[in-house]
Amino acid sequence: MMQTIDELLSDFETALDVQAVALAKARRKVLTPDERLRLVRASRRSWEQMRAARRELDRLAGN
C-alpha cells in the first residue's frame, strides 16, 4: 500500500526525532566510548527508516 505524503513526512519526522535523541544521549560526557557507540548502533533502524522515507519523498517529487 502506498503511503500518502503526510504519512511519509510523519515517518521522516519521527525517525529524525529518534536520531536527535540518540545523538544527544551519545554526546553525554559521562558515558564511556563503548556506551556512546552502542547508542549510535542502536539508532541504526531509525536511520534506515528515515532514509527510506526520504527516498520515497524524493521519488514522489520526481527526483
Image (spheres, rainbow, N blue to C red):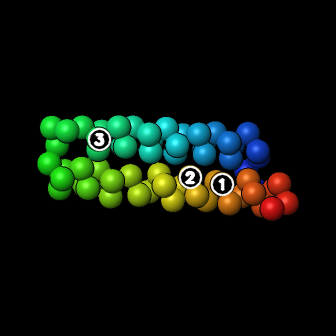
Note whether 61 is above or below 12 in the view shown. below
Q: Picture coordinates of residue 13 (x, y %)?
A: 59, 39
**Camera-side residue: 21 or 4?**
21
Q: Which residue is mark 3?
A: 27
Crowding at dot 1, Cα within 10 Å, few <14 / some 14-19 / many 20+, comes out as some
Q: Give the amino acid at mark 2.
A: Met
Q: Is residue 16 left or right of residue 31?
A: right
**Camera-side residue: 12 or 23?**
23
Q: Picture coordinates of residue 63 (x, y %)?
A: 80, 62
Q: Which residue is mark 1?
A: 54
Rendered residue at 60%/45% (across/down) = 12
Q: Give the amino acid at mark 3.
A: Arg
Q: Which residue is mark 2?
A: 50
Rendered residue at 68%/42% (across/down) = 9
Q: Is residue 35 left or right of residue 49?
A: left
Q: CA distance from mark 1 to mark 2?
A: 6 Å
Q: Picture coordinates of residue 40 (x, y %)?
A: 33, 53
Q: Secondary structure at mark 2?
A: helix
Q: Secondary structure at mark 3?
A: loop
Of the numbered discs 3 and 1, the one sitting upstream in the chain is 3
**Camera-side residue: 33 or 10?**
33
Q: CA distance from mark 3 to mark 2?
A: 21 Å
Rendered residue at 71%/58% (across/down) = 56
CB of mark 1 within 8 Å of CB of mark 2? yes
Of the numbered discs 3 and 2, the one sitting upstream in the chain is 3
Q: Secondary structure at mark 1?
A: helix
Q: CA distance from mark 3 to mark 1?
A: 25 Å
